[in-house]
Amino acid sequence: MINIIWFFMIVIGIIFSIINCKLDTINQVVLKNTGEAVAFAIGLTGIMATWIGLMKIAEKSGLIRSIGKILSPILRFIFSDIPKDHLANTAIIMNVVANMFGAGNSATALGLKAMEELQTLNDKKDTATNAMAMFLVINMSSVQLIPLTVLKIRSDAGSLNPTEIISTTLIATTVSTIVGITACKLMERK
Amino acid sequence: MYKILNIVSITAIPFMITIILVHGYIKGVKLYDTFVEGASDGFKTAIKIMPYLIAIFLAIGIFKESGALDVFSRILTIPGRLMGLPKEIIPLIVIKPISGSGSLAMVKDLVYTYGPDSLIGRIASTMMGSSETIFYTMAIYFGAIGIKKSRHTLSCALIAHIAGVIASAVACRIIFT
């Protein structure tokens, strides 16, 4: 799937740049965006190492097990195939919490940790499990409580009430998350 | 209100760190050694995702800068209007799953052009907070652990995205009129 999308995005892009006489921008993108990707990954390294380090502490202290126990009923329902005491549970919870508060890079770090843990439960290492699909769908429907960047834009643009969109954002994000979970539950049986 | 929320957001992460450390301290965990041990694992993961990031940044960059993305969003104006969405919002629906920085720039543009308190400004702001950049997230999360077959992930994510878009428009129409 990703192979096909990747191929078409690039080829269609190059065709369009020929039509629009923008071939030189392709050269710029090849240089600039690849550099940005490396810079981003390096930037992420610090926060990534920090969170995995903290999680290791939480794992040894038993905090992870306690959190897992408290939230176990919810997790059991959504991720039916992750064992109770598994580290994946905590990584998922911490990722959702970081996402809720808009801590993007911390969320990514914890999310990657969650994926690694889920991979340890996977029999077919090249195929996504139900739990992985579910986790990513929840993650991508973004359970964000406070969309700070948007609030900043609105207040800069002179909104009379920049925070009024929090309620609608919560409604929209709840709907998209519930629809995502339902779609996953329906499709994972296949 | 904005300031209070800002404080809540800022405190979340330090709060999590404090709880982890204090709990570890009480339970007698060797904090420093354990942290370093975990951090070296984190280091490896960050390096491992780099090639996937390059691949996805490259494809998104070419697709966006060539003008292909604009054309695609214009094509989708027609089904979008059928769902009762203002046509100014449609490009954002297309860009949101593909590019985070691109959609942020577009929200900014919409908010400044039509006003933050217009229906379009409100729907755009709502949509921005209600979904994530799908292609990028999938590429790095699956890439980092070597998943090739994503099964139903993409279709479910897109269904959730569309549901979020419709919910944004409906919620704004109901709440702000």
Image: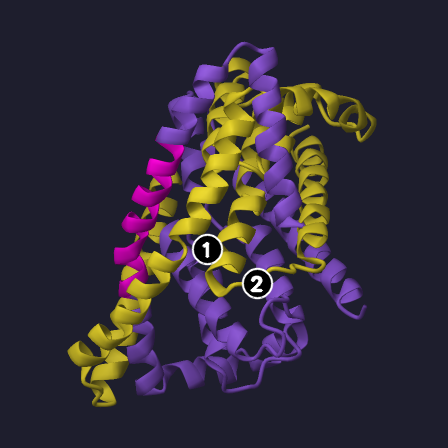
Chain colours: A purple, B yellow
Q: Can residue A27 be seen in this view?
A: yes
Label 2 CA crowd tier, 10 Å (few <14, some 14–19, many 20+): some
Query: Measuring 47% from the left and 70% from the top, which residue is drawn there?
Result: A116
Residue B83 painted magenta: no
Residue A106: image quadrant is bottom left
Query: Measuring 16% from the left and 77% from the top, which residue is drawn there?
Result: B32
Q: Quadrant of the C terminus of chain B?
A: top right
The chain identifier of the residue carrying mark 1 reads A
Label 1 CA crowd tier, 10 Å (few <14, some 14–19, many 20+): many
Distance in Å between CA atoms under marks 1 and 2:
23 Å
**Residues rendered magenta in the picture:** A32-50
Q: What residue type is labelled 2?
A: Ile
Residue position for label 1: A99
Residue A109: image quadrant is bottom left
Q: Which amino acid does label 1 sit on?
A: Asn
Residue A35 painted magenta: yes
Q: Which of marks 1 and 2 is in front?
A: 2
Residue position for label 2: B147
Q: What element carries label 2?
A: loop
Residue B66: x and y in percent read 54, 20
Query: Measuring 61% from the left and 12% from the top, which residue is drawn there?
Result: A19
Q: Is the magenta stretch mostly helix, strand or loop?
A: helix
